[in-house]
Amino acid sequence: MLSKKAMCKSHGQDSCYFLGWQEYEKNPYDEGQNPSGIIQMGLAENQLSFDLLESWITRSHNKTGFKKRGGSIFRELALFQDYHGLPAFKKGLVDYMSEVRQNKVKFDPNKLVLTAGATSANEILMFCLAEPGEAFLIPTPYYPGFDRDLKWRTGVEIVPIHCSSQNHFRITISALEEAYEHAQKLQLKVKGLLFTNPSNPLGTTMKLEELNQIINFALDKNIHIVSDEIYSGTVFDSSRFISIMEALNKRDLQNSDISTQIHIVSSLSKDLGLPGFRIGLIYSNNETLIAAATKMSSFGLVSSQSQYLLSKILADKKFTTMYIKENQLRLKNRQKLLVSWLLEIGMKCLRSNAGLFCWIDMRHLLTSNTFEAETELWKRILYESGLNVSPGSSFHCTEPGWFRICFANMTKETLHLSIRRIKALVDSLECTLLQNYQQQHKVKSLEKNNLFCEHIRLPSLDSERDH
C-alpha cells in the first residue's frame, strides 16, 4: 500500500515531452552501432564547448588534484559536511554570475544557497513561498518539468499566463491580469510569478520594459517573483541579457521591500554544460528565506569534491572570460546553421537570441488546427523520422503546431542528418495534405502531377481559415 503522493499523477511525466524520452531510450541513435535509431532532439544540453573544459582539466591537473600547500586535502573534503557550501566555490559562483551579466549586477555569496541542480532550487522555493493549494503564475509556453518540480511534492498550483505568437509570445499586462483574475475565480491565492529568462522553450530574452511590467505587477499584487535564469550564459545575439536584479537596481529598489520578494534560480548545467555535477542555486535578499532554504538544501547537497573542482575552474578568470565568449559564438553559429537549414525546407522559427534550442513553426503541416493533429504529427516525427522533438502542447502552448528542437547536444553531422529526416517527412506530408486539399476544394489535377507536390505548397491553416 503506497501513499497518495506516490500514486498521484501530478508529476506531469505522462506528457509527450517525457514519453519521447522513453522511446529514445529504447532505440537511441548511434552513427556506428544504430544508424537508424532515434536522434535525441529533446535534450537541452550544451556539448558545443565541452572540449574547452576538457582542455582546462588537462592543462590544470596540478590544480585539480586533492592537494593544498603541498599536502593532501582528501581527508578534509571527504569529511566536509557543512551544508552552507565551500566559501571558495560560492565566491567563484557569484563572480561568474556577475561576469555572465556583464558585471551590471554584483552578488553576495552570503545570500546564496547551493542545491542539487535547478530542479531542487525551484522546489525549495515553492516550499518556502507557498502553502499547498496556493498558486504561482507562469507564462506559457513553459518548461514541462515545472509541472513536476513546482507541484508534485509541494502541492502548489500553476496558473498559466497565456501568451500568443501574435506578439512573439511576449508577456503583456492584460495577460498578467487575466491570469490573476482566473486564479481568483478558482479561489486560488496567488503567491508569486515564476518565469524563465532566457525563455525555455522560446530561446528569447526579456526586455527591460517587460521586467518592469512584472515588477509593477508584483508590487500591485504584493506577490513574489522567481526568475529562473539558468540559460543566462547562453545569450548569443542581439540584445544582451538583463537580469531581474539589474532591472530592480535601475529603479533604485534594491533596498526596498520588493527586493526581499525577488528570487533568482541559476545553475551550471546550461552555461558551463555540466548537468551531471548537479550544481544549482537560489539567490535572494530575503534573509529568512535563505535561512530556511539552506536547511532544506540538506536533502540534496552538492558534494564537496564537486565544489572543490569547480571552484578551481571558476577561479581562473582568464579561462571563464574566454569560455563565455567562445561558447556564445559557438551557440550563435550552430543556431544560425539550424535556422538556415530549416528555411531551405520551408520551415520557420521564432526569432531567438539565446538557449540551446529553436521554437519551430510546423502549423502548416497539421491536418487540422487541433492538439490532436499536433500529437499525430509528433508521433510521425518520432516513429517515422526517428527524431525525438518536443511538441508545444507539452509546454502548455495554447496554439497547436509549435515544436522545440534542441541543437547543442549533437555533432554538426548528426544535426544535418536530422534535417534530412525532417525534409523527407515534410515532403511526404505536404504531398498528402495537398492531395487532400485538392479533393476537398475540387481542384483539378495539373497536367504534370509529378511536379505538383514538389513545387507547390499547401496554403497555411491560417490562410484557409481566413477564407
Image: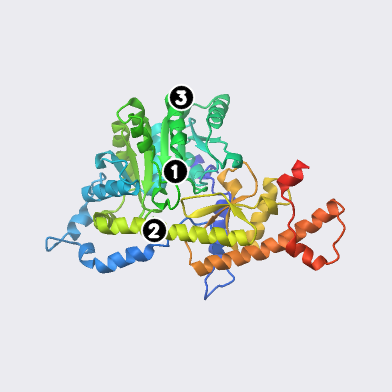
User: Between tags 3 and 1, which lies in front?
Assistant: 1
**Residue corresponding to mark 1:** 197
The mark found on residue 185 in the picture is none
Q: Is residue 191 left or right of residue 282?
A: right
Identify the residue at image location x=70%, y=63%: 427
Identify the residue at image location x=75%, y=59%: 456
Q: Is residue 2 visible?
A: no
Q: Earlier in the sequence, mark 1 or mark 2?
A: 1
| Residue 222 occupies quadrant | top left
Q: How far is the residue under mark 3 from the one under mark 2?
A: 39 Å
- Which residue type does callout 1 highlight? Asn
Q: Earlier in the sequence, mark 3 or mark 2?
A: 3
Give the image location of residue 119, x and y in percent.
Answer: 42, 46
**Colour treatment of the image:** rainbow
Q: Badge 3 local density, few (<14 within 10 Å), some, or many (20+)? A: few
Q: Secondary structure at mark 1?
A: loop
Closer to the camera in the image, 125 or 357: 357
Q: Badge 2 local density, few (<14 within 10 Å), some, or many (20+)? A: many
Give the image location of residue 204, x and y in percent.
Answer: 49, 46
Against 282, residue 363 (above or below) is below
**Residue corresponding to mark 2:** 327
Q: How far is the residue under mark 1 from the one under mark 2?
A: 18 Å
- Disc 3 and disc 1 in contact, CB within 8 angstroms: no
The mark found on residue 221 in the picture is 3
Closer to the camera in the image, 122 or 381: 381
